[in-house]
Amino acid sequence: MVLRLLPSVIVSICALQLAGTTAAQPFEPQLPDPGNVSLSRQQQEQIGFKTAEQVYQQMPVLPDSSPETQYIRQIGQRLAAVIPPDHSWPFVFHVVAEKDINAFALPGGEMFVNLGAITAASNEAELAGVMAHEMSHVYMQHSAKQMQKSQMMQGLAGLAGAILGSGGGVLGSLGAEGIQIGAGMVMLKYSRGDEAQADAVGAMILYRAGYNPQALADFFRKLEAQGGNGPQFLSDHPDPGNRDEAILREIRNWPPIQYRRDDAEFQRARAVAAKAPAYSADEIAQGAKTGRWVTLNKRNGAVLMPQTGVPVSQNEQPQAGGSPGGSSYRPVAWSAVAPATSYTYTDLGLLKMVRPVNWQVVAAQQQGQFITVAPQAGMVDGGIGYGVMVNSVVPNSQTSLDETTQQIAQNLQSGQSGLQPQGSITDIGVGSTRGRSLTLQSTSPFPDANGHAQAERDWLVTASRPDGSVVYMVFVAPAAQFERMRPAFSRMIHSVQF
Ligand SMILES: [Zn+2]
Protein backbone atom coordinates (compact mmCIF):
# COMPACT_ATOMS: atom_id res chain seq x y z
CA MET A 1 0.00 0.00 0.00
CA VAL A 2 1.51 3.26 -1.10
CA LEU A 3 -0.55 6.28 -0.19
CA ARG A 4 -0.26 9.51 -2.06
CA LEU A 5 -2.77 11.45 -0.01
CA LEU A 6 -3.19 11.14 3.67
CA PRO A 7 -6.39 11.08 5.67
CA SER A 8 -7.34 14.57 6.63
CA VAL A 9 -7.84 14.36 10.36
CA ILE A 10 -4.85 13.19 12.25
CA VAL A 11 -4.32 13.41 15.96
CA SER A 12 -0.88 14.01 17.28
CA ILE A 13 0.94 11.05 18.62
CA CYS A 14 1.88 11.16 22.22
CA ALA A 15 3.96 8.57 23.95
CA LEU A 16 1.99 6.91 26.66
CA GLN A 17 3.44 7.24 30.08
CA LEU A 18 5.00 4.02 31.16
CA ALA A 19 3.54 2.56 34.28
CA GLY A 20 5.89 2.71 37.22
CA THR A 21 7.91 -0.43 37.59
CA THR A 22 7.79 -2.45 40.73
CA ALA A 23 11.09 -2.00 42.48
CA ALA A 24 12.26 -5.19 44.13
CA GLN A 25 12.19 -4.82 47.88
CA PRO A 26 14.86 -6.76 49.73
CA PHE A 27 12.37 -8.29 52.14
CA GLU A 28 9.87 -9.39 49.56
CA PRO A 29 9.83 -13.00 48.41
CA GLN A 30 11.80 -13.19 45.17
CA LEU A 31 10.68 -15.26 42.23
CA PRO A 32 13.05 -18.16 41.53
CA ASP A 33 15.11 -18.39 38.38
CA PRO A 34 12.87 -20.23 35.90
CA GLY A 35 15.87 -22.09 34.48
CA ASN A 36 16.62 -23.07 30.93
CA VAL A 37 14.91 -25.48 28.61
CA SER A 38 15.77 -26.79 25.18
CA LEU A 39 12.71 -25.32 23.53
CA SER A 40 13.41 -21.71 22.69
CA ARG A 41 11.09 -18.92 23.80
CA GLN A 42 9.97 -18.60 20.20
CA GLN A 43 9.11 -22.28 19.98
CA GLN A 44 7.18 -22.15 23.25
CA GLU A 45 5.24 -19.09 22.12
CA GLN A 46 4.51 -20.69 18.78
CA ILE A 47 3.31 -23.93 20.36
CA GLY A 48 1.12 -21.97 22.78
CA PHE A 49 -0.30 -19.80 20.03
CA LYS A 50 -1.09 -22.76 17.77
CA THR A 51 -2.69 -24.55 20.69
CA ALA A 52 -4.73 -21.47 21.59
CA GLU A 53 -6.07 -21.49 18.05
CA GLN A 54 -7.14 -25.08 18.63
CA VAL A 55 -8.83 -24.07 21.87
CA TYR A 56 -10.88 -21.54 19.90
CA GLN A 57 -11.97 -24.39 17.62
CA GLN A 58 -12.99 -26.60 20.48
CA MET A 59 -14.33 -24.43 23.25
CA PRO A 60 -16.77 -21.55 23.57
CA VAL A 61 -14.57 -18.57 24.38
CA LEU A 62 -16.18 -15.31 25.46
CA PRO A 63 -15.51 -12.33 23.20
CA ASP A 64 -12.52 -10.26 24.25
CA SER A 65 -14.91 -7.36 24.79
CA SER A 66 -17.05 -9.25 27.30
CA PRO A 67 -17.10 -7.77 30.83
CA GLU A 68 -15.85 -11.08 32.23
CA THR A 69 -12.82 -11.11 29.92
CA GLN A 70 -12.08 -7.46 30.55
CA TYR A 71 -12.20 -8.07 34.27
CA ILE A 72 -9.94 -11.13 34.04
CA ARG A 73 -7.52 -9.11 31.93
CA GLN A 74 -7.31 -6.41 34.58
CA ILE A 75 -6.37 -8.97 37.19
CA GLY A 76 -4.00 -10.73 34.79
CA GLN A 77 -2.16 -7.56 33.89
CA ARG A 78 -1.76 -6.70 37.56
CA LEU A 79 -0.22 -10.13 38.19
CA ALA A 80 1.97 -10.09 35.07
CA ALA A 81 3.36 -6.69 36.10
CA VAL A 82 5.28 -8.23 39.01
CA ILE A 83 7.15 -10.73 36.86
CA PRO A 84 10.68 -9.63 35.96
CA PRO A 85 10.52 -8.49 32.32
CA ASP A 86 13.46 -10.65 31.27
CA HIS A 87 11.54 -13.75 32.23
CA SER A 88 8.06 -12.62 31.33
CA TRP A 89 5.83 -13.77 28.50
CA PRO A 90 3.19 -12.07 26.37
CA PHE A 91 0.32 -13.08 28.65
CA VAL A 92 -3.16 -12.92 27.13
CA PHE A 93 -6.24 -13.85 29.14
CA HIS A 94 -9.46 -15.44 27.91
CA VAL A 95 -12.65 -16.68 29.54
CA VAL A 96 -14.21 -20.01 28.58
CA ALA A 97 -17.98 -20.46 28.93
CA GLU A 98 -17.55 -23.65 30.93
CA LYS A 99 -19.20 -24.48 34.24
CA ASP A 100 -16.35 -26.52 35.68
CA ILE A 101 -13.97 -24.83 38.07
CA ASN A 102 -10.87 -24.72 35.95
CA ALA A 103 -8.24 -22.60 34.31
CA PHE A 104 -5.28 -23.45 32.14
CA ALA A 105 -2.33 -21.66 30.64
CA LEU A 106 -0.34 -22.55 27.56
CA PRO A 107 3.39 -22.12 27.10
CA GLY A 108 4.07 -18.60 25.90
CA GLY A 109 1.33 -17.01 28.00
CA GLU A 110 -2.15 -17.66 26.58
CA MET A 111 -4.40 -18.29 29.60
CA PHE A 112 -7.99 -19.52 29.72
CA VAL A 113 -10.16 -19.12 32.83
CA ASN A 114 -13.53 -20.86 33.08
CA LEU A 115 -16.67 -18.98 34.08
CA GLY A 116 -16.95 -21.69 36.74
CA ALA A 117 -13.71 -20.51 38.35
CA ILE A 118 -15.00 -16.93 38.49
CA THR A 119 -18.26 -17.92 40.13
CA ALA A 120 -16.59 -20.36 42.55
CA ALA A 121 -14.23 -17.76 43.98
CA SER A 122 -15.30 -15.91 47.13
CA ASN A 123 -13.23 -12.84 46.43
CA GLU A 124 -10.88 -11.39 43.86
CA ALA A 125 -7.78 -12.66 45.65
CA GLU A 126 -8.95 -16.29 45.27
CA LEU A 127 -9.56 -15.82 41.57
CA ALA A 128 -6.22 -14.02 41.22
CA GLY A 129 -4.67 -16.95 43.11
CA VAL A 130 -5.79 -19.49 40.50
CA MET A 131 -4.50 -17.23 37.76
CA ALA A 132 -1.18 -16.68 39.57
CA HIS A 133 -0.81 -20.46 39.89
CA GLU A 134 -1.37 -20.85 36.12
CA MET A 135 0.96 -17.97 35.38
CA SER A 136 3.64 -19.71 37.43
CA HIS A 137 3.48 -22.78 35.20
CA VAL A 138 4.20 -20.49 32.25
CA TYR A 139 6.89 -18.55 34.11
CA MET A 140 8.63 -21.77 35.23
CA GLN A 141 8.23 -23.20 31.68
CA HIS A 142 6.77 -26.37 33.11
CA SER A 143 5.17 -27.47 29.84
CA ALA A 144 8.44 -27.15 27.98
CA LYS A 145 10.21 -29.03 30.76
CA GLN A 146 7.60 -31.79 30.60
CA MET A 147 7.97 -32.05 26.84
CA GLN A 148 11.70 -32.29 27.29
CA LYS A 149 11.29 -35.14 29.76
CA SER A 150 8.72 -36.98 27.73
CA GLN A 151 10.20 -40.23 26.48
CA MET A 152 8.24 -40.50 23.29
CA MET A 153 9.47 -37.27 21.86
CA GLN A 154 12.04 -37.99 19.21
CA GLY A 155 14.12 -34.93 19.56
CA LEU A 156 12.78 -31.50 20.26
CA ALA A 157 13.40 -30.23 16.79
CA GLY A 158 11.11 -32.96 15.51
CA LEU A 159 8.53 -32.10 18.09
CA ALA A 160 8.54 -28.42 17.28
CA GLY A 161 8.39 -29.27 13.61
CA ALA A 162 5.41 -31.55 14.10
CA ILE A 163 3.59 -29.04 16.22
CA LEU A 164 4.29 -26.11 13.97
CA GLY A 165 3.57 -28.04 10.83
CA SER A 166 0.29 -28.23 9.03
CA GLY A 167 -3.05 -28.08 10.80
CA GLY A 168 -3.96 -30.76 13.30
CA GLY A 169 -0.33 -31.21 14.20
CA VAL A 170 -0.83 -30.07 17.76
CA LEU A 171 -3.45 -32.61 18.66
CA GLY A 172 -1.68 -35.34 16.75
CA SER A 173 1.70 -34.75 18.30
CA LEU A 174 0.54 -34.21 21.84
CA GLY A 175 -1.86 -37.12 22.01
CA ALA A 176 0.62 -39.29 23.80
CA GLU A 177 1.85 -40.41 27.14
CA GLY A 178 1.90 -37.78 29.85
CA ILE A 179 -0.20 -35.43 27.84
CA GLN A 180 -3.83 -34.94 28.48
CA ILE A 181 -6.54 -34.06 26.07
CA GLY A 182 -9.93 -33.52 27.63
CA ALA A 183 -12.93 -31.62 26.39
CA GLY A 184 -10.85 -30.45 23.47
CA MET A 185 -8.29 -29.03 25.81
CA VAL A 186 -4.68 -29.69 25.13
CA MET A 187 -2.26 -29.44 27.95
CA LEU A 188 0.53 -31.25 29.57
CA LYS A 189 -0.09 -33.00 32.80
CA TYR A 190 2.03 -31.35 35.41
CA SER A 191 4.01 -33.32 37.93
CA ARG A 192 3.47 -32.96 41.66
CA GLY A 193 6.82 -31.18 41.82
CA ASP A 194 5.58 -28.69 39.23
CA GLU A 195 2.43 -28.22 41.27
CA ALA A 196 4.28 -27.50 44.50
CA GLN A 197 6.42 -25.01 42.61
CA ALA A 198 3.44 -23.35 40.92
CA ASP A 199 1.74 -23.02 44.31
CA ALA A 200 4.82 -21.39 45.86
CA VAL A 201 5.57 -19.10 42.92
CA GLY A 202 1.87 -18.35 42.52
CA ALA A 203 1.72 -17.22 46.14
CA MET A 204 4.71 -14.92 45.52
CA ILE A 205 3.12 -13.38 42.43
CA LEU A 206 -0.10 -12.91 44.34
CA TYR A 207 1.65 -11.26 47.27
CA ARG A 208 3.79 -9.00 45.09
CA ALA A 209 0.66 -7.90 43.22
CA GLY A 210 -0.84 -6.85 46.54
CA TYR A 211 -3.18 -9.76 47.19
CA ASN A 212 -3.28 -11.81 50.35
CA PRO A 213 -1.48 -15.01 49.33
CA GLN A 214 -3.52 -16.99 51.81
CA ALA A 215 -6.36 -16.77 49.30
CA LEU A 216 -4.60 -19.39 47.19
CA ALA A 217 -4.68 -21.85 50.08
CA ASP A 218 -8.31 -20.92 50.80
CA PHE A 219 -9.34 -21.67 47.24
CA PHE A 220 -7.60 -25.04 47.15
CA ARG A 221 -9.23 -26.01 50.45
CA LYS A 222 -12.58 -25.16 48.93
CA LEU A 223 -11.87 -27.27 45.82
CA GLU A 224 -10.82 -30.24 47.92
CA ALA A 225 -13.94 -29.94 50.04
CA GLN A 226 -16.11 -30.47 46.97
CA GLY A 227 -15.62 -34.20 47.19
CA GLY A 228 -16.73 -36.65 44.52
CA ASN A 229 -14.41 -36.69 41.54
CA GLY A 230 -13.45 -33.16 42.45
CA PRO A 231 -13.26 -30.31 40.02
CA GLN A 232 -11.27 -30.68 36.82
CA PHE A 233 -8.68 -28.27 38.16
CA LEU A 234 -7.50 -30.81 40.73
CA SER A 235 -7.03 -33.59 38.19
CA ASP A 236 -5.08 -31.27 35.92
CA HIS A 237 -3.13 -29.85 38.84
CA PRO A 238 -2.66 -32.76 41.25
CA ASP A 239 -2.30 -31.98 44.92
CA PRO A 240 1.39 -32.24 45.79
CA GLY A 241 0.33 -33.17 49.33
CA ASN A 242 -0.93 -30.97 52.15
CA ARG A 243 -1.34 -28.25 49.60
CA ASP A 244 -2.86 -25.52 51.71
CA GLU A 245 -0.53 -26.20 54.64
CA ALA A 246 2.47 -26.00 52.33
CA ILE A 247 1.27 -22.65 51.00
CA LEU A 248 0.65 -21.31 54.50
CA ARG A 249 4.13 -22.43 55.56
CA GLU A 250 5.61 -20.70 52.52
CA ILE A 251 3.95 -17.36 53.19
CA ARG A 252 4.28 -17.43 57.00
CA ASN A 253 7.32 -15.14 57.24
CA TRP A 254 6.46 -12.67 54.52
CA PRO A 255 6.00 -9.20 55.94
CA PRO A 256 2.35 -8.24 56.23
CA ILE A 257 1.26 -5.55 53.80
CA GLN A 258 -1.97 -3.71 53.19
CA TYR A 259 -3.67 -6.21 50.91
CA ARG A 260 -5.92 -5.00 48.13
CA ARG A 261 -9.65 -5.37 48.46
CA ASP A 262 -11.57 -4.94 45.24
CA ASP A 263 -14.54 -6.87 46.35
CA ALA A 264 -17.21 -4.56 44.93
CA GLU A 265 -15.75 -4.95 41.44
CA PHE A 266 -15.36 -8.68 41.98
CA GLN A 267 -18.97 -9.07 43.10
CA ARG A 268 -20.14 -7.22 39.99
CA ALA A 269 -18.02 -9.38 37.68
CA ARG A 270 -19.11 -12.57 39.42
CA ALA A 271 -22.77 -11.61 39.12
CA VAL A 272 -22.31 -11.08 35.37
CA ALA A 273 -20.43 -14.39 35.06
CA ALA A 274 -23.16 -16.23 36.97
CA LYS A 275 -25.77 -15.09 34.44
CA ALA A 276 -23.72 -15.88 31.34
CA PRO A 277 -24.51 -19.14 29.51
CA ALA A 278 -22.00 -21.77 30.61
CA TYR A 279 -21.62 -25.33 29.37
CA SER A 280 -20.62 -28.64 30.89
CA ALA A 281 -17.48 -30.42 29.77
CA ASP A 282 -19.66 -32.93 27.88
CA GLU A 283 -21.57 -30.23 26.07
CA ILE A 284 -18.30 -28.59 25.13
CA ALA A 285 -16.84 -31.84 23.80
CA GLN A 286 -20.03 -32.35 21.79
CA GLY A 287 -19.94 -28.82 20.40
CA ALA A 288 -16.31 -29.28 19.41
CA LYS A 289 -17.37 -32.21 17.22
CA THR A 290 -20.20 -30.37 15.52
CA GLY A 291 -18.26 -27.17 14.90
CA ARG A 292 -20.62 -25.23 17.14
CA TRP A 293 -17.82 -23.31 18.87
CA VAL A 294 -16.10 -22.40 15.65
CA THR A 295 -19.31 -20.76 14.50
CA LEU A 296 -19.87 -19.06 17.84
CA ASN A 297 -16.31 -17.82 18.21
CA LYS A 298 -16.23 -16.53 14.64
CA ARG A 299 -19.51 -14.71 15.19
CA ASN A 300 -17.95 -13.13 18.27
CA GLY A 301 -15.15 -11.76 16.15
CA ALA A 302 -12.43 -13.97 17.60
CA VAL A 303 -9.12 -13.39 15.88
CA LEU A 304 -7.40 -16.45 17.30
CA MET A 305 -8.89 -18.79 14.75
CA PRO A 306 -6.80 -21.07 12.59
CA GLN A 307 -7.30 -20.23 8.96
CA THR A 308 -8.32 -23.49 7.42
CA GLY A 309 -9.33 -24.26 3.90
CA VAL A 310 -7.65 -21.19 2.47
CA PRO A 311 -4.60 -22.49 0.69
CA VAL A 312 -1.73 -20.21 -0.06
CA SER A 313 -2.61 -19.59 -3.64
CA GLN A 314 -0.75 -18.20 -6.55
CA ASN A 315 -3.94 -17.79 -8.52
CA GLU A 316 -5.21 -14.45 -7.39
CA GLN A 317 -4.79 -12.06 -10.24
CA PRO A 318 -4.05 -8.43 -9.82
CA GLN A 319 -7.18 -6.58 -10.57
CA ALA A 320 -7.70 -4.69 -13.76
CA GLY A 321 -6.56 -1.12 -13.50
CA GLY A 322 -3.70 -2.03 -11.24
CA SER A 323 -0.31 -0.52 -11.62
CA PRO A 324 0.64 -0.56 -15.25
CA GLY A 325 4.03 -0.67 -16.76
CA GLY A 326 5.80 -2.76 -14.17
CA SER A 327 7.00 -1.95 -10.73
CA SER A 328 10.18 -0.23 -9.74
CA TYR A 329 10.70 -2.77 -6.98
CA ARG A 330 12.19 -6.22 -7.25
CA PRO A 331 10.37 -9.37 -6.15
CA VAL A 332 10.74 -10.08 -2.45
CA ALA A 333 11.54 -13.52 -1.08
CA TRP A 334 9.17 -14.76 1.63
CA SER A 335 12.15 -15.37 3.92
CA ALA A 336 13.04 -11.67 3.77
CA VAL A 337 9.67 -10.57 5.14
CA ALA A 338 8.42 -13.60 7.11
CA PRO A 339 7.46 -12.68 10.66
CA ALA A 340 9.74 -14.12 13.33
CA THR A 341 8.09 -16.59 15.67
CA SER A 342 9.07 -14.43 18.63
CA TYR A 343 7.08 -11.31 19.43
CA THR A 344 7.70 -8.31 21.59
CA TYR A 345 5.37 -5.71 23.01
CA THR A 346 5.83 -2.31 21.43
CA ASP A 347 4.41 1.01 22.54
CA LEU A 348 3.39 2.90 19.40
CA GLY A 349 1.95 5.82 21.34
CA LEU A 350 -1.51 5.38 19.83
CA LEU A 351 -1.60 1.85 21.12
CA LYS A 352 0.54 -0.97 22.35
CA MET A 353 0.74 -4.22 20.42
CA VAL A 354 3.08 -7.09 19.86
CA ARG A 355 5.20 -7.23 16.74
CA PRO A 356 7.44 -9.94 15.34
CA VAL A 357 10.91 -9.15 16.68
CA ASN A 358 12.34 -8.89 13.16
CA TRP A 359 9.88 -6.21 12.07
CA GLN A 360 10.79 -2.59 12.62
CA VAL A 361 8.84 0.35 13.90
CA VAL A 362 9.15 3.49 11.82
CA ALA A 363 7.82 6.52 13.63
CA ALA A 364 5.28 8.80 12.04
CA GLN A 365 7.53 11.68 11.00
CA GLN A 366 9.66 9.44 8.85
CA GLN A 367 6.88 7.63 7.11
CA GLY A 368 4.16 10.09 6.17
CA GLN A 369 1.88 10.36 9.11
CA PHE A 370 1.51 6.67 9.62
CA ILE A 371 3.42 4.61 12.10
CA THR A 372 4.76 1.64 10.23
CA VAL A 373 5.56 -1.76 11.64
CA ALA A 374 7.09 -3.81 8.89
CA PRO A 375 10.00 -5.95 7.82
CA GLN A 376 12.78 -3.86 6.32
CA ALA A 377 12.45 -5.66 2.99
CA GLY A 378 8.72 -4.94 2.92
CA MET A 379 9.05 -1.16 2.98
CA VAL A 380 8.90 1.04 -0.08
CA ASP A 381 8.95 4.77 -0.61
CA GLY A 382 5.86 6.19 1.08
CA GLY A 383 4.40 2.87 2.08
CA ILE A 384 4.79 -0.83 2.49
CA GLY A 385 4.20 -4.04 0.61
CA TYR A 386 4.31 -6.12 3.76
CA GLY A 387 3.46 -5.11 7.32
CA VAL A 388 1.04 -2.77 9.00
CA MET A 389 0.45 0.97 8.98
CA VAL A 390 -1.17 2.53 12.02
CA ASN A 391 -2.86 5.89 12.39
CA SER A 392 -5.80 7.53 14.08
CA VAL A 393 -8.61 9.96 13.37
CA VAL A 394 -10.85 12.02 15.59
CA PRO A 395 -14.42 11.49 14.40
CA ASN A 396 -17.31 13.81 15.14
CA SER A 397 -18.88 12.76 18.38
CA GLN A 398 -22.06 11.57 16.65
CA THR A 399 -20.29 9.32 14.18
CA SER A 400 -20.56 5.58 14.69
CA LEU A 401 -17.53 3.34 14.35
CA ASP A 402 -19.09 1.85 11.21
CA GLU A 403 -19.39 5.28 9.62
CA THR A 404 -15.87 6.23 10.67
CA THR A 405 -14.55 2.97 9.23
CA GLN A 406 -16.37 3.74 5.98
CA GLN A 407 -14.84 7.21 5.89
CA ILE A 408 -11.35 5.89 6.57
CA ALA A 409 -11.77 3.37 3.76
CA GLN A 410 -12.86 6.16 1.40
CA ASN A 411 -9.91 8.28 2.46
CA LEU A 412 -7.56 5.40 1.80
CA GLN A 413 -9.17 4.83 -1.59
CA SER A 414 -8.66 8.45 -2.54
CA GLY A 415 -5.03 8.08 -1.53
CA GLN A 416 -4.31 5.04 -3.65
CA SER A 417 -5.65 4.39 -7.11
CA GLY A 418 -7.18 0.98 -7.67
CA LEU A 419 -7.88 0.35 -3.99
CA GLN A 420 -11.26 -1.35 -3.72
CA PRO A 421 -13.19 -2.85 -0.80
CA GLN A 422 -13.85 -6.59 -0.98
CA GLY A 423 -16.95 -7.42 1.00
CA SER A 424 -18.40 -5.40 3.80
CA ILE A 425 -17.53 -4.18 7.28
CA THR A 426 -17.63 -6.86 9.97
CA ASP A 427 -17.03 -7.04 13.71
CA ILE A 428 -13.67 -8.05 15.07
CA GLY A 429 -12.10 -8.24 18.52
CA VAL A 430 -9.26 -5.73 18.85
CA GLY A 431 -7.44 -6.40 22.10
CA SER A 432 -10.20 -6.27 24.66
CA THR A 433 -12.43 -3.96 22.63
CA ARG A 434 -14.74 -4.52 19.72
CA GLY A 435 -13.54 -3.12 16.41
CA ARG A 436 -14.41 -3.26 12.73
CA SER A 437 -12.77 -5.05 9.88
CA LEU A 438 -12.84 -4.40 6.14
CA THR A 439 -10.77 -6.11 3.47
CA LEU A 440 -9.63 -4.06 0.50
CA GLN A 441 -7.62 -4.98 -2.53
CA SER A 442 -5.10 -3.08 -4.59
CA THR A 443 -1.87 -3.77 -6.40
CA SER A 444 1.30 -4.60 -4.52
CA PRO A 445 4.31 -2.37 -5.00
CA PHE A 446 6.25 -5.62 -5.28
CA PRO A 447 5.97 -7.79 -8.38
CA ASP A 448 5.55 -11.55 -7.99
CA ALA A 449 8.46 -13.93 -8.43
CA ASN A 450 8.06 -13.75 -12.20
CA GLY A 451 8.19 -9.99 -12.19
CA HIS A 452 4.47 -9.56 -12.89
CA ALA A 453 2.28 -7.11 -11.03
CA GLN A 454 0.35 -8.87 -8.30
CA ALA A 455 -2.76 -8.19 -6.25
CA GLU A 456 -2.36 -6.89 -2.73
CA ARG A 457 -4.72 -7.36 0.16
CA ASP A 458 -5.16 -4.47 2.55
CA TRP A 459 -6.92 -5.42 5.75
CA LEU A 460 -8.35 -2.39 7.49
CA VAL A 461 -9.05 -2.80 11.19
CA THR A 462 -10.46 0.01 13.31
CA ALA A 463 -11.16 0.44 17.02
CA SER A 464 -12.23 3.24 19.32
CA ARG A 465 -9.71 4.46 21.86
CA PRO A 466 -10.86 5.46 25.33
CA ASP A 467 -10.43 9.16 24.40
CA GLY A 468 -12.97 8.84 21.56
CA SER A 469 -10.46 8.83 18.74
CA VAL A 470 -10.44 5.91 16.35
CA VAL A 471 -7.24 4.07 15.68
CA TYR A 472 -6.92 2.24 12.40
CA MET A 473 -4.47 -0.30 11.15
CA VAL A 474 -3.94 -1.45 7.59
CA PHE A 475 -2.34 -4.88 7.39
CA VAL A 476 -0.72 -5.33 4.02
CA ALA A 477 0.64 -8.26 2.03
CA PRO A 478 0.35 -9.53 -1.52
CA ALA A 479 -2.93 -11.45 -1.84
CA ALA A 480 -1.04 -14.65 -2.70
CA GLN A 481 0.81 -14.52 0.61
CA PHE A 482 -1.81 -12.95 2.79
CA GLU A 483 -3.02 -16.14 4.45
CA ARG A 484 0.54 -16.98 5.31
CA MET A 485 0.89 -13.60 6.95
CA ARG A 486 -2.51 -13.61 8.62
CA PRO A 487 -1.55 -15.42 11.85
CA ALA A 488 1.00 -12.69 12.59
CA PHE A 489 -1.56 -10.00 11.79
CA SER A 490 -4.19 -11.70 13.95
CA ARG A 491 -1.81 -11.94 16.81
CA MET A 492 -0.98 -8.24 16.58
CA ILE A 493 -4.68 -7.28 16.50
CA HIS A 494 -5.37 -9.59 19.37
CA SER A 495 -2.66 -7.99 21.51
CA VAL A 496 -3.73 -4.34 21.13
CA GLN A 497 -3.91 -2.33 24.33
CA PHE A 498 -4.72 1.33 24.69
ZN1 LIG B 1 -0.93 -26.46 38.41
Image (spheres, helix red, strand yellow):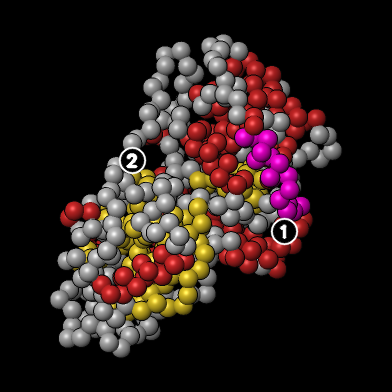
Q: Position of residue 191 (x, y in %)?
A: 62, 35
Q: Is residue 204 magenta?
A: no
Predominant secondary structure, magenta span: helix
- Position of 148 with respect to 273 (left or right) is left
Q: Position of residue 318 (x, y in %)?
A: 32, 83
- Position of 5 with respect to 387 (left or right) is left
Q: Residues within 10 Å of mark 2 (few under 14, many from 20)?
A: few
Identity of the amino acid at label 2? Leu
| Highlighted range, magenta | 265-281
Residue 33 seen from this side: yes
**Extreme residue in the bottom direction:** 320
Quarter-of-image position of residue 476: bottom left
In the image, is residue 84 above or below residue 424? above
Residue 187 seen from this side: no
Q: Provide the secondary structure element on which disc 2 rests.
A: loop
Q: Provide the secondary structure element on which disc 1 rests.
A: helix
Would you name the residue on which mark 2 appears?
Answer: 16
Quarter-of-image position of residue 223: top right
Would you name the residue on which mark 1 appears?
Answer: 285
Q: Nearer the viewer, residue 480 or 186?
A: 480
**Extreme residue in the left direction:** 328
In the image, is residue 120 above or below residue 458? above
